[in-house]
Image (cartoon, helix red, strand yellow):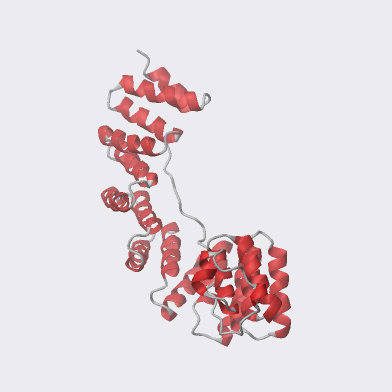
Amino acid sequence: MRILSLIPAVLLLASFFLACNQTPEPSPSRLPKKGTDPIYDSLGITLDSLRKRAVMYTEADSLVSALQAIDAVIEVEGLTVTNGIALSEIYLRLGKADQAQRTLYDVLESHPENVELFTAMARMFLVRENYMMCHSYAERAYALDPTLAKPVFLDGLAYAEEGDTTKAIHCFSNVLVTDPGHYDAKVQLGLLYSQQKNPLAVEYFKAALKEQPESMEVQHLLGLFYQQNGQFRAALNTYACLIEIAPWYFHAWYNSGYIHMVYLQQFDSAAFYFNEVVNLVPEYTDAIYNLGYAYELAGDFTQARKMYRRVLALHPDYVLAIQGIQRVRP
């Protein structure tokens, strides 16, 4: 039997929001034909629209299209700070970290004191797991503009990755001083305090839910904190809220079943929850096994045998199911 845990060490920012100024219009020959691209059609024919299109495609992981769009802008406008950051982000997502780094260094040569560029450098080195350089550029960005939350947040992520919980908490707390509504900082603080089994985790997860009330991620983490710290009714209530938001989210069903079976010894209820998991994910062998075990504990050996056989049909070497079959032989 296993508790499914989804606590990540660090939640990386997906991307940067890139600000850009109005620029001259490119020649029509450089642009897609009207009617061939819904994003292009909605934005109009300008370099600024192409840049926005590149960012939108990057966010959607349509990276080839993003690269084509930003290349068209760079061909006309050159490698500005904004264009370089956008291109570097695309390279990072393509798994071309060396090219991402070279791009930012090329921009750095002509813009040696730019806060957006320093922030992008910090993110790039964080992704590359070069935490010393991440700290360096985050600190340089903060020195140029102490009102910015993003470089401090990246600094905190790097410390969290390095296992320096104290400094990570300090950074994320400082982010909230600058930006009290920063959702990701609240999640990170919840995660860090969870690892310490500190009740402050609950406060930060609930604060994050005020920012994004339907966050499945945070509902799950909150329920998991309650579960791992013996607050089983609170965990079940949290998972119930999560199921109401997203009935297809099988992890909440699974953990509810586990609590009912292992901690509350309510085996019929456990079978109900594990059955819902199996309906959602028919080949989830751990859930099928636990459904069988719940039936066994409830005294329904016939259903238990069916579940154990179903597990073995999927994985003939599943030891727990082999042992289960032995226990419930007629």
Q: Residue at x 56, y 84 (%)?
A: 21
Residue 47 figure quarter: bottom right
- Up-down relation of residue 109 to residue 89 (above or below): below
Residue 114 visible in the snapshot: yes
Residue 204 figure quarter: bottom left
List x then y, in percent, for residue 210.
32, 67
Q: Nearer the viewer, residue 34 or 195?
A: 34
- State the quadrant of the N terminus: top left
Q: Is residue 160 left or right of residue 283?
A: right
- Up-down relation of residue 110 to residue 275 (above or below): below
- State the quadrant of the C terminus: top left
List x then y, in percent, for residue 271.
30, 33
Q: Nearer the viewer, residue 11 or 65?
A: 65
Q: Nearer the viewer, residue 209 or 18?
A: 18
Residue 163 visible in the snapshot: no
Q: Is residue 325 left or right of residue 316?
A: left
- Up-down relation of residue 62 to residue 34 (above or below): above
Q: Is residue 176 left or right of residue 94?
A: left
Q: Residue at x 33, y 23 (%)?
A: 303
Considering every residue shown, the one lying at the far top of the view is 330
List x then y, in percent, for residue 10.
52, 61
Residue 295 figure quarter: top left
Q: Residue at x 49, y 55 (%)?
A: 8
Q: Nearer the viewer, residue 315 or 5?
A: 315
Q: Residue at x 35, y 56 (%)?
A: 219
List x then y, in percent, for residue 269.
26, 36
Tell me how many marks there are.
0
